[in-house]
Each structure stands twice: as structure tokens, then as C-alpha cells.
Amino acid sequence: MREMNDDQLLRYSRQIMLPGVDIEGQTALLDARVMIVGLGGLGAPVAMYLAAAGVGALVLVDDDVVELSNLQRQVIHHTGDIGQSKVASAAASIKAINPDVAVTTHCLRLSAANLTPLLDGVQVLLDCSDNFAIRFALNAAAVAHQIPLVSGAAIRLEGQVAVFDSRDPSSPCYRCLYDEQNDENLSCSESGVLAPLVGVIGSMQALETIKLLAGIGDGLTGRLQLYDARKSAWREMRLPRDPDCPVCKDRAYQ
């Protein structure tokens, strides 16, 4: 176990004092490597909270640039960042929050073909994208490499968050829930979204990631939480595995 210096002990003291975290849990965060795909509305709070919490290495993937219309909800970017790549803008904000975090950036359009080389050493994969093709590629890679996938989505005034962990024989995968023929690929630019909603869902994704890494609490594996911001109401669904799922059907069942 690595030894934390005095500055780290002070920076993370409010987490270290939690019985479920302690020195061991904080050390696990410092040693962790996490990939965030999408540095928009969801990826913004995810990246900032994971950096602030002391996750040691963050891999940022996005091919987009910062635009004025992003700033209403993508709080990791600022007016002066307009025209800059989102991964570069996000990396600068992360370093301002916590200079000890090792940040790797990939300004590229993710696909099944270029995803695998980026996964080396990654312990949790975060889907903060708004594209079904990318979501299915991430899910297939997460199953193949047995990396937990923390998935979030938000549109209009509705959001959802779930954890798919192929290390758990009882856990479904994202493909168990959604058919690849689904063409309802809605985006914020087409449908709109209320700014704090992505903060709520992104913060939940960050929380579930920290719980996975530090080994604390009961996670959302096998559960889908749905948030209706209009009614300020949460509801939860249990997600069974699909025995005919083309992605995970060959995994052993529990």
C-alpha cells in the first residue's frame, strides 16, 4: 500500500474519515485508472468529482470541440475554451481541481475498432456519450475485458443511471436492456435538456464509480434508476440477464 503525503491526507481527509473508505479505500482511488467517454453534460461532473475525490488516472475520450451552446450544462468548459477540443478543455479544468491526477486525452471518435488499445489498465469504464453505436461498442468491450461499465443518460427532464458489471455472473449487460435496432438516438441539441439534470445523473455515475473502486456500499449492478426531474421522483427497475443476449449469453450464469 502506498503512503500518502501530508497534502494528500489533508486534501482527502473528509473521505478518509468515513469508516467505509479509510486509508485503504482512498489508496485504491489514488491507484485507480478510469476511462470517461464523452466530456459533455454527463462527463463534466463525472470528471470533476472523480478528480476531486482523488482517482489517480483519468482517460478522457471525445472528438468534439467546445461550442457556446455547450456552456449551459457542460460545466467543465468555460467561455474561453470555445473552439478548443473538449478533452483538452476538460484536462485543464481537472488539473486546476487536482494537479496530482494523471490525465490522458484522446480526441477521437470512438469505435469498436479503436477502443481496445485504450483500455489497458482501466478499472472502470464510464459511458457519458449520447450515441447508441458508441454505447454498444463500450458495452461489448466491457463484457469482453470484464470491466465494470457505469452508464448514464439524460434528455429533456428525464435521466437514468445503471451499472453493468460482467465480473458478476448475475449482472446483465447494456445489450440485455437495449436492442441494437433501437434508432431513438436522441440528443440534447435535438430535444433539449435542463442543465442541472445532467449534473444529477453525472454525479450519480461518479458516486457509483467511487463505490466500485473503494469497495464500499451497495452498487447499482443489475439495477436501473430512473429520475423524473419534473416530478422530482426516482424509481428503480431490477434488470435480469437476457439468456439470448448476443453479447453476454456465453458468460456463466449464477
Image (spheres, rainbow, N blue to C red):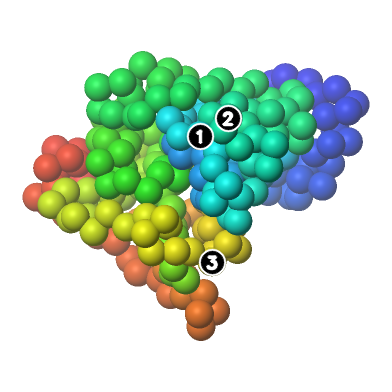
Q: Earlier in the sequence, mark 3 or mark 1?
A: 1
Is 203 placed above or below 148 here?
below
Check if mark 2's residue and mark 1's residue have beta carbons within 8 Å.
yes
- What's the CA distance linking mark 3 and mark 1? 21 Å
Q: Residue at x 41, y 20 (%)?
A: 118
131 to the left or right of 7: left
The outermost residue toward the bottom is: 231
Q: Nearer the viewer, residue 113 or 149?
A: 113
Residue 8 vs residue 119: left or right? Answer: right
Residue 74 at x, y percent in the picture: 58, 49
Camera-near label (2 vs 3) is 2
Disc 1 marks a residue whose amino acid type is: Val
Between discs 2 and 1, the one toward the N terminus: 1
Instruction: Classify mark 3: helix, strand or loop.
Output: loop
Amino acid type, label 3: Leu
Residues packed near mark 1 inside 10 Å, few (<14), some (14 to 19) or many (20 plus): some
Residue annotated with mark 2: 84
Query: Residues under labels 2 and 1: Cα distance?
Result: 5 Å
Looking at the image, which is closer to me, 10 or 229?
229
Q: Secondary structure at mark 1?
A: loop
Q: Position of residue 231 (x, y in %)?
A: 51, 83
Report x, y in % for residue 88: 59, 26
Label 3 vs label 1, nearer the camera: 1
Residue at 69% x, 28% y is: 92
Name the residue beneath numbered marker 1.
Answer: 65
Answer above or below: position of 88 versus 161: above
Report which residue position mark 3 lands on.
194
- If you read the primary sequence from the N terminus, does the residue marked by circle 2 or circle 3 appear first? 2
Helix, strand, or loop for circle 2?
loop
Which three-letter amino acid code belongs to the residue tagged 2?
Gln
